[in-house]
Amino acid sequence: MARLTTVSRKPLQLGLIAGAVGTVALNVVTYADMAIRARPPSSMPVEAAGKLAEKIGMPLGNEENSTHHKKGLGALPGFVTGLGTGAAYGLLRSRKDLPLPVAVLGSSVAAMAGSGVPMTALGLTDPRKWPASSWAMDIVPHLAYGAAAAAAYEVITR
């Protein structure tokens, strides 16, 4: 018990752990959806990596290497968003008690914005033009993120 008390004083670290759990949940739901519906992975992370590399002048090598670089780089922002959202959640929750549904919804919206806003800013998507199926495909994994992150935080801080 003494160790939990010591650990519970570190909201940033606990939020990172919760964010990691949420990120795993989001990925599981996303890959399950791909498997169930036989849909391909989104090309947006790769496109975003290419656009960002171009903007900052980062060389990606020849065409074959460029594709591999973009695929590797494209996955990283999702992890940064998941961990960053979790860290922010940990800092907020350490100062404010929130009902679990509010915590889940807030985390879900923050993670969704963290991934969607940059894609929109890069001109890769326009959520105003999405059909309901695209919204569902985006909302469901982010709700899984929020639920898993909030639950994990509650478990490790009690």
Image (spheres, grey):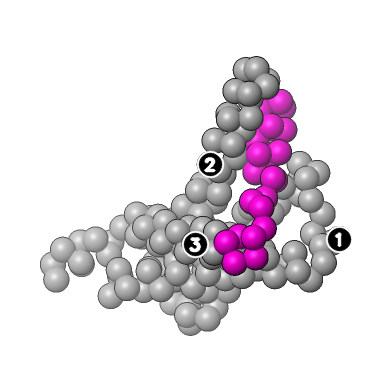
Magenta span of residues? 34-56
- Measured as percent of width and height from the top left, residue 118 is found at 69, 47
* Tag nearer the camera, 3 or 2: 3
- Measured as percent of width and height from the top left, residue 27 is found at 51, 58
- Measured as percent of width and height from the top left, residue 93 is found at 43, 68
Distance between mark 2 and mark 1 Cα atoms = 26 Å
Distance between mark 3 and mark 1 Cα atoms = 26 Å
Q: Amino acid at mark 3?
A: Val
Judging depth in this view, the residue of 143 and 93 nearest the camera is 143
Whichever of labels 2 and 1 marks the residue nearer the N terminus, that label is 2
Within 10 Å of disc 3 (Cα), the crowding (few <14, some 14-19, many 20+) is: some
Judging depth in this view, the residue of 37 and 136 nearest the camera is 37
- According to the image, label 3 marks what residue? 28
Label drawn at residue 129: 1
* Label 3 element class: helix
Q: Is residue 124 left or right of residue 58?
A: right
Query: Contact (CB < 8 A) between labels 2 and 1?
Result: no
Label drawn at residue 76: 2
